[in-house]
Image (cartoon, rainbow, N blue to C red):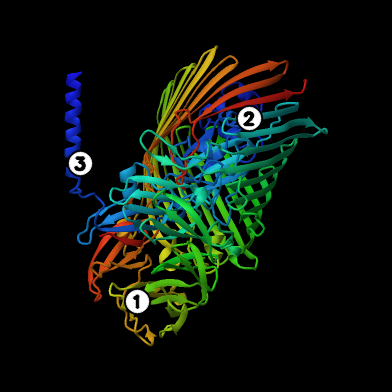
Amino acid sequence: MKINSILVALFTVSLLASCEKNETEPLQPYDTGVIVVNSGNFSDNNGTLSLIQRTGQTTVTDIFQKENMRSISGGLSGYAEVNDKGIILVDNSTAGKDAIEIVNARTFKTVATIPSVEIENPRTVIKVSETKAYVSAWDATGDFSNFYKNPGYIAVLDLTTNKIVKKIAVQNGAESLALVGNEVYVGNTGSGKTILTVIDVASDAIKQTIEVGRNPTLIGLDASNKLWVYAAGELQKINTSSKTVESKLKITASNASKSPSSFVLSADKATIYYTFSFYDAADGYVQKGETYSFSTTSTAIEAKTPFINRLFSGGLAVDPQTGDLYAGLVPSYKQAGYVFRYKSNGTLIDSVKAEIAPSKFFFKK
Amino acid sequence: MVRRTSTVLVSVLGIALAGFSPNCYSQKEQTLCEVTVTAVKPERFMIGQKVKDIDSTQLAQNRFTTLANFLQFQSPIAFKSYGAGQLATISFRGTSSSHTAVLWNGVNINFPSLGQSDFSTLPMSGFDEMTIQYGSAASCVGTDAVGGSILLRSVPKFNQTGLQAIAGVSAESSKNYAGQAGLRFYYPVAKNWKISGKTLFYGADIRNDFGNDPIQNRKGAQYPVEPMQTLQKGFVQDIYALHSNGNLFSLNAWVTDNNLTIQPNSLSLREITQTKAQRYVLSYNVGKTLLRAAYINDVLDYGRADNTNPSHTDIDRYLFRVEHDFSWIKSCERGTNLKVGSEVTHYAAQVDGYGKELKTENRAEFYLLLRYQHSLRFSSSLNLRQALVSGYNPPFTPSLGIDYRVFSSPTDRLNLTTNIAYSYRVPTLNERYWVNLGNPALQPEIGFNKEIGAVWKRRTSEHFHQQYSINAFHNLIDNWTYWNPDKNYKVENLQQVLAKGIEIETSHRFITAAWEATAQFQYALTHSSQQKAYGPYTQDILGKQLIYVPRHSLSGTLGVTSGAWSFTVQQLYNSARYITFDHSGRPFPSYYLMNAWATYQHKLKQHRLHFQLQGNNLTNTLYPNLKKNAMPMRSVSFNVIFIFNQKK
């Protein structure tokens, strides 16, 4: 008995000692770097997350599988973090098989899985408070004649319980999200809806809608606190106090068949980058285009001299820490893509091999 | 078609179930005198190629199996399955799913819009005989036979008399149910005419119910289970009228209807694929001339939810063929056979993806198949084919084969074989006519296959037969089509693939008065890879094994029959399969499958009752399909088949 008491005492002491040590927080494997969301090939259900560092060529592939001994069952449509939790949006090619995986953002060990019955076609996730994330979703889709058949919704994800606590019905094809102060703006893709929905984060209720034109895509808040939206083929500046459209600009170019996509703001919020491309019918439908930029103070936007004379189909993102531009290159959906990095002046830094279809990026501290 | 040897063939519906048929060994040797009575099968001209008949026992035992499930145990045939009861496409000798010709009664039944067959919709009970041909045989059978061909036949049975009826049911623990009922009849109707035929109805309700939760194995692999239901029904009708002068009328009909529903329990999430085919072949063998007309209609509808507005594919094919056999027979061991034929096919496609208008296409083929047998030691073939297609012409397609017996003794025979063959694949209708993405100027794919083989047959006694064979092939396929993502998935002749490999087969058979045992084993080493760069990032994929093609594949069948009992075990091992062109990411791991049957046959006067206990995936192996969902785990099924024979 005595010996046991001594052992218990020793154990307690050692526990206390280890607690003290923990105060210096050892570095976890996923504390720093950039998470690359590789969407995968849709019907292959092989989306993955990779971790790259801000400098260097090393890529840690399929980090979810690495840490959890199971793979993500589907393509990937988004990743965001709320404090120490990572939220992964899983889009399986079979209807009714999507999911949200919640992991420890520092270790990538699984924390919880929101099952498929609770989420269908999740598209974008953003942090809206210290305990809450919003996930836009299409709900079940229909056949090609009426693809966005159901109203979209915003799933309110409570990260203290790891549960969806509310679904806010919004316009069909709900896609892009932007947090402005205490409000979240919701745009949509493909469905032809013409409004932005504004949601109050405190009450998780719709405040109002703003008419902007077909299929609005949110870009973000610029340095002068104007919200940029691309809708009805125009770039629009929205005054978030009055909820009115202040200006509209069309991109002019010598080639009228080009269309823009992948808008992203620079780190100083003074420049917007975008890709501008078309399928050349005269040349076997080869996709042709470049990456352009314009100043948020421009009064006219002309796509004349490319910022980067190259087209990226995998999406663009800017590292808020370094200001570097990250661009996903997708050679095909059956082979690994690359992440190209450029300085904010357009100089190529390097390219890093990622996985299938690098399309979104999350920048860690 | 009547052959003298048909007298030794046993009824597929009947006796075959009782034991092993005499055709257990592939390629039963027939003399020239025997085979040239009427028409000569195209397989006779495939000299130097590996050709294997599947014995009727295996066909009968797999009466509730689909062609996909059966053929996966025949290395090097691999399947790309989207799930049990779902689309299953073939990869034969490392080629793509449109590089295997599937012929039913001499007519290519690949779905013309895709140029391939969904082997999950073809049940084993739809035909009477099957031959597997390995490698390029386009000069013999036409388009698609680049990696191999699967030849399915209906066969008249004029040797039995009266009526035979069959009824069978199958219930599987994974909530799969199947049933079939049919008749086979034979009657002399007039002084010079005999009528024979077969009618069979079949149906299945397949759920593959393994729960709703993801399945995990001890190694930590985890795959979800996809809720599905397949309703399959079909109808086979064969009628033959044989005149005493040998002339034969045949009508073969095969109607299939396959309805696959994913998420069947949720109206909103449902995804429905309905595949229907009607196939009719009318043949008249008059002397050594064959006249054949065929009509095939393929319908494919894909819809979601309440399925009110499915996307629709409806393609008609009309085919006419005239063929004549010549023979110059010096002796039963020496002589020449020549088959000369031509066919025309008209395609009419109403497909949503092709736009509103009907797309039509005409194709014609002319062929000359020559077989020269100098002696039992030496035979050779020279086959020539020229196909013509509206708008452009596939290349002239010759092949040359030699079979030489280098050693012969009362117990042993060793044959060396070689074959050199061009092959081609006419682009599919989707590849030519899909709005914007299709390419009417697409070139046919061209294959050039060279192979050598050796077959050693050994019969040390009446009780023990052995056969060993080895084949090596080198098949270069050029103009391989690719839906190019750089061009918004417009299809182009961009790729060049080299498929090469070695195949080893062994076969053993012991026979005693009381029992019989067989062991068949196949191993295939297949390397199939992209050869030609076609874009800046194709350097990452050159020389790498094609996706879903296992490098090593082993399969085998063991069988024992004793009295009323028979036991069969089927096994399969496939090495890891890559799922990306550049081998990035995690490949599908290697897997092993085992199925087994125990059959007891009970005789009731002249009737028979079969009880069959069947175990599928007995080792409960977890392995993924193409959508990374779990394939079926262990299941047990119980089959009962009743065979009624009219009193003689």
Ranked by sequence position, the earlier of labels 1 and 3 is 3
Between the C-alphas of marks 1 and 3, the distance is 44 Å
Q: Can you identify the residue that label 3 sits on?
A: A19
**Residue A284 percent coordinates (x, y):** 45, 72
Q: Residues within 10 Å of mark 1 (few under 14, many from 20)?
A: many
Q: The disc numbered 2 marks a residue on which chain?
A: B
Q: Can you identify the residue that label 1 sits on?
A: A222
Left or right, B640 with reference to B215 = right
Q: Can you identify the residue that label 2 sits on?
A: B170
The answer to whether residue B32 is visible is yes
Between the C-alphas of marks 2 and 1, the distance is 67 Å
Marks 2 & 1, CB-CB < 8 Å contact? no
Q: Is residue B610 above or below residue A290?
A: above
| Image depth: mark 3 or mark 2 in front | 3
Looking at the rendered structure, the kind of residue marked 3 is: Cys
Q: The disc numbered 1 marks a residue on which chain?
A: A
